[in-house]
Image: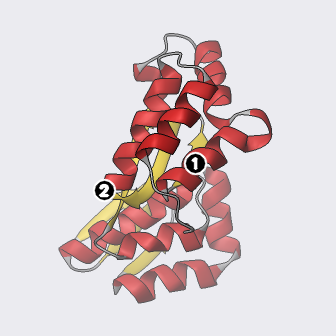
Amino acid sequence: MKDFIKIPLKYKKVLLKKPNIKEEIERVTNTKITINEDIEIDGDGLNVYVAKNIIKAFGRGFSIEDALKLVDDLYSLEIIDLSDYANTDNRIKVISGRIIGSQGKTKKYIERYTNTKIAVSGKTVSIIGKWDDINLAREAILMLIRGSTHKTVYRWLEQNAKVNEW
């Protein structure tokens, strides 16, 4: 089976400059990856799906180490499209800024209390984690999008989440 994926040029350039990353994805997913205009993934169905998710996560701004967690069935990638919640590019920037927080504090806080990894890129917020943890992180992010104060979100996280180190 073959599938294709597009990722931002800056991440595609990283894959071209550091072939060890592409080789690691190929090794753990038992697929063959070819980088041209699109990224082509060849292999059996499930492995192609996993490789595509890893590359998608990498293209959203996750480190390759975090993206490779998607090899494990317990981990998943969730992408929240901020344009579903905001009408203008300026509003999307404001929401992104609220999610990231001053010097990344809010993003780190959500990651810590939900045992997830979060990447804010363009018009999307992406989350890697276990299903239940993703649900907690998504709810905290949606609270921020809907205008809850940071203090309210922090308190909610402290009451509803468990602190683990990833």
Task: Name the residue: 68% across, 77% down.
Answer: 18
Name the residue tied to disc 2. 131
Along the line of sight, which residue is nearer the eye, 35 or 85? 85
**Residue type at mark 2?**
Trp
Q: Residue at x 37, y 76 (%)?
A: 71
Mark 2 or mark 1: whose residue is earlier in sequence: 1
- Residue holding disc 1: 119
Horizontal relation, residue 60 to residue 138: left or right = right
Q: Quadrant of the C terminus?
A: bottom right
How far from the left and from the top, in percent, is residue 44? 21, 79
In this orientation, does residue 38 appear?
A: no
Give how far across and how far down residue 118 sits, in percent.
55, 50
Image quadrant occupied by the N terminus: bottom left
Front label number (2 vs 1): 2
Q: SS for tag 1?
A: strand
On screen, residue 20 versus residue 38, left or right, reads right
Q: Secondary structure at mark 2?
A: helix
